[in-house]
Image (cartoon, rainbow, N blue to C red):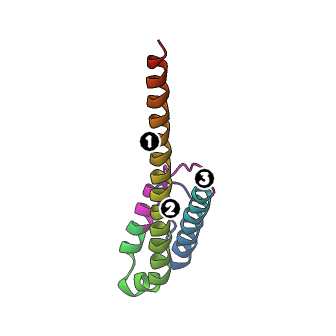
Amino acid sequence: MSSGEARTGLDGLRRDLSDVCQAVVAARRTVESGGLVDLSGLEDRIADLCGSVQRLPKTSGRALQPELLGLVDELSQLTEELGRQRDQVKSELEETNIRQAAASAYRKSQK
């Protein structure tokens, strides 16, 4: 499914929600293992799904609540993992900057 192609009907939306949720899980696992992920298009896919759910009759939309809550949970976990990765990279950069400053100061003292 690409942006703008959300399936209609309850079963189609369930499949789309499952596909998006699986993509989020895969992204989180990649980040957990130290890899980089490309999340471009994910926001559009989720927006398309939400729009499709909003157009459903309320009872049908409510039937998707477990899947939607599962997606929210997976997105929260991905957000947390991305935050950990950001903090780790920030820490590594700070350590590198300290080492570079120390090496620069040492070189200057040797002149």
Q: Amino acid at mark 1?
A: Glu
Per the rendering, the mark at residue 81 is 2
Q: CA distance from mark 2 to mark 3?
A: 10 Å
Give the image quarter of residue 21: bottom right
Q: How many marks?
A: 3
Mark 2 and mark 3 in contact? Answer it, CB < 8 Å. no
Report the front residue among 34 and 46. 34
Per the rendering, the mark at residue 45 is none
Residue drawn 50% across and 70% down? Answer: 74
Residue drawn 46% across and 86% down? Answer: 63
Sequence-wise first label, 1 or 3: 3
Q: CA distance from mark 1 to mark 2?
A: 20 Å
User: Which residue is labeled 3 in the image?
Assistant: 34
Please provide percent x and percent y for residue 90: 45, 46
Q: Which residues are magenta?
A: 33-49
Please provide percent x and percent y for residue 14: 54, 75
Please identify, in this view, whether the residue under mark 1 or under mark 2 is nearer the observer: 1
* 17 left or right, relative to 44: right
Q: Amino acid at mark 3?
A: Gly
- Residue farthest top in this picture: 111
Asked if residue 90 is among those painted magenta in the image, a careful observer would answer: no
Please provide percent x and percent y for residue 57: 37, 82
User: Which residue is labeled 1 in the image?
Assistant: 94
